[in-house]
Image: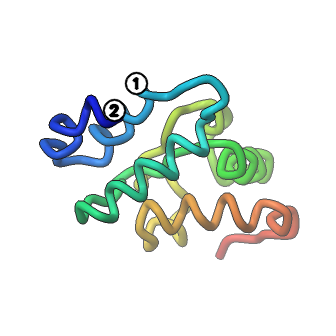
């Protein structure tokens, strides 16, 4: 990524950062590592995601929302989901907050009921 520092410094969106990190990944550096690295760089540059990026844990949370009928079937297969596609209560959150909720609460979401 050091070789891409100029591209990183020019980035204005989280998508740009995410794509740069993805292009620089090495074997064993999975989708969660890509997201976390882009988030750390973005935080330093004051750039936040405007979409809910799906990776390991967040994808599992999204699958539960699909199973419960809160999300369109196939949503969990996407790279990301637009905030406006999320259930109404989750649309009030920032994209990174929704991702965090999906990831950290996946084990407790089976009893979830949206208002």
Q: Label 2's element?
A: helix
Q: What residue is drawn where x is 55% and y is 25%?
A: 26
- Position of 45 with respect to 89 (left or right) is left
Q: Please rate how many residues cluster around mark 2, counting C-alpha atoms within 10 Å: few if below 14, some from 14 to 19, many from 20.
A: some
Res. 82 mark: none
Q: Where does the image place residue 68, in percent across and percent down from the top left?
A: 78, 53
On screen, residue 54 versus residue 111, left or right, reads left
Q: Quadrant of residue 87?
A: bottom right
57 versus 23 height, above or below: below
Q: How many marks?
A: 2
Q: Residue sitting at 43 percent across and 73 percent down?
A: 92
Residue 113 x/y as whole percent: 76, 71
Q: Give me the disc on residue 23.
A: 1
Q: Is residue 42 left or right of residue 75?
A: left
Q: Position of residue 96 (x, y in %)?
A: 46, 62
Judge by depth and name the residue closer to the eye, 4 or 22.
Answer: 4
Nearest to the observer: residue 37 or residue 90: 37
Q: Are marks 1 and 2 in contact (CB under 8 Å)?
A: yes
The N terminus appears in which quarter of the rendering?
A: top left
What residue did someone put label 2 on?
20
The residue at the point 65 percent across, 51 percent down is 58
Secondary structure beneath label 1: helix
Residue drawn at (23%, 47%), measured in percent from left and top? Answer: 13
């Amino acid at each position: 990524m050091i070789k891409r520092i100029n591209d990183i410094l020019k980035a204005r969106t989280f998508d740009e950062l995410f794509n740069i990190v993805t292009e620089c990944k090495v074997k064993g550096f999975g989708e969660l590592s890509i997201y976390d690295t882009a988030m750390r760089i973005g935080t330093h540059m004051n750039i936040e995601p405007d979409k809910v990026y799906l990776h390991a844990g967040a994808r599992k949370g999204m699958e539960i929302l699909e199973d419960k009928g809160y999300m369109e079937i196939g949503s969990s297969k996407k790279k990301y989901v637009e905030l406006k596609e999320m259930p109404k209560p989750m649309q009030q959150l920032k994209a990174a907050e929704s991702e965090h909720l999906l990831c950290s609460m996946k084990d407790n979401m089976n009893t979830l009921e949206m208002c």
